[in-house]
Image (cartoon, rainbow, N blue to C red):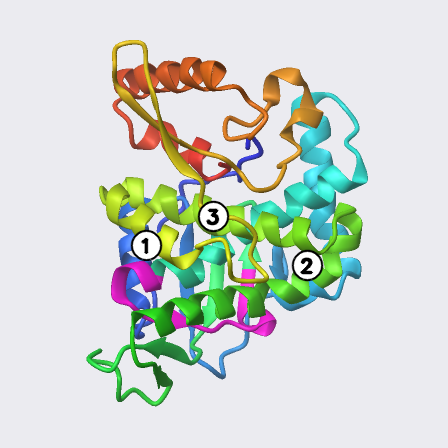
Amino acid sequence: MLHSPQLSALPVPVAVASPVGAAWERLAEVFPELRVTELAADEPGPTGGDWVSAAGLAAAGAELDGYLRWDHEQIERDYGRTPRPDVVASFGFHRYAWPACLLITLPWLLVRRVPRYGAGDVYFDRPRYRMTVRAVPFACLPDDPEAGHPLAVVVPDEDALRAEVRDAVAAHLGPLLDGIGPRMRRRGRALWGMVTDEIVEGLAYMGELLGDQARTAAELEALLPGTIKPYVGTPGFRELIGPDGERLPTRDRVSCCLSYTLGAEEICGTCPRLCDSERVARLSAERVAAEGAGGGAARAEEAAAA
C-alpha cells in the first residue's frame, strides 16, 4: 500500500522499564520512525494535539471524524482527487492497525510475552508516528523470568501463547472494526481479512529489519494457519524467480487495500490480481533500487505502508 505515515526526526523517548520494554527498545533501534512509550497503569494518557485514543476511534464519533479528516486531506493533496468515504475509512483503519498489531506481535516475537491492550490502553499520534500504551497484563510461558510478575498470566506452551496473540489482537481491534467497519463498507470476513493482512505485513517487515525473515515467516505461518476464526487466510508467503534466477519473496494479500482507487499505477504489489510477471518486474526493480540506496532507511517509509 502507498499511503505511508508522515514520519518525523524527533528523538526516541525512553520507555518505562516493563516486561515488554525490551521490545520497544529493539523497535527503536531498527525502526525509529515508530516510537512507543509506556505509561504506568494509573498514569493518564496523552491528550490534545494530534493524539487520539483507540477507545475514541472505536466510539465512531467526533474523534474518529477528526482522525479520518487527515486521511481525506492527505489523499486530496497527494493524489489530486476526492476519495470515496470507504477508501478514507479503510486507509485510516490501516494506518492505525499496522502499528497497533505490532504492539502485540513484536513482544511475542522478541521476548515471548503477549500484552493484552484494551481500547482504553493505547493512544496514537499519527503525524509524528508515536504510540503510548499502558502497563497491562501479559501472557508468558512457565520458564519466563517474569512469570512471577504481578501482571503475568502464565500459559502452558507455545500453542497457548499463539492463541493469546490471536485473542489479544482480536480483543483490541474488534471494537474498532465495530466502529469504523460500516464506514469501510465491509463486514465480517472482509474486515477480519484486513486484520490478518495487518498482522502479517507489519511483523514480516520487522523480521526483515531484524535480519530474521525466515524465523518470522515460520512464526506467522504457525500463528495464522488459515483455519482459526475470526482470522481469514494464511500469511500467503511464496517465492518467484527473477530474470537472473534470483529468488524474490512475495505474498498474496487476503483483503483489498483499495490503493487501486488512487489510479491504475497504484495497484498494490501484493494484490492477488497482480500477475506474477508484473510482480517479478516490480520486485526486481525494487531490489536494484534498494541495493543502490543502501537498503534500510530508503525502505523504511515504504514498508510502514505495506
* Residue 170 image point, x, y percent: 56, 65
| Front residue of this view, candidates 254 and 53 | 254
Q: Nearer the viewer, mark 2 or mark 3?
A: 3
* Residue 53 image point, x, y percent: 62, 64
Mark number, residue 271: none
Find the residue positioned furthest to the top.
Answer: 243
Vertical arrangement, residue 175 with respect to residue 272, above or below: below
Magenta range: 107-123
Task: Kindly report the distance in space between the C-alpha atoms of the residues bearing marks 3 and 1.
Answer: 12 Å
Q: What residue is shown with label 1?
A: 219
- Of the image marks 3 and 1, the number of the one nearer the N terminus: 1
SS class, disc 3: loop
> How many C-alpha atoms fall within 10 Å of the one at disc 2: few (<14), some, or many (≥20)?
many
Residue at point 29% right, 41% down?
209
> How many C-alpha atoms fall within 10 Å of the one at disc 1: few (<14), some, or many (≥20)?
some
Residue 105: image quadrant is bottom left
Q: Is residue 118 magenta?
A: yes
SS class, disc 2: helix
Mark number, residue 234: 3
Vertical arrangement, residue 205 with respect to residue 264, above or below: below
Q: Say which amino acid is labelled 1.
A: Glu
Q: Say which amino acid is labelled 3.
A: Thr
* Residue 277 image point, x, y percent: 46, 14
Residue at point 63% right, 29% down?
259
Q: Is residue 246 magenta?
A: no
Q: What residue is shown with label 2?
A: 177
Q: Say which amino acid is labelled 2.
A: Leu
Vertical arrangement, residue 135 with respect to residue 108, above or below: below
* Residue 121 image point, x, y percent: 54, 72
Task: Kindly report the distance in space between the C-alpha atoms of the residues bearing marks 1 and 2.
Answer: 25 Å
Q: In this rendering, would 19 be left or right of 105?
A: left
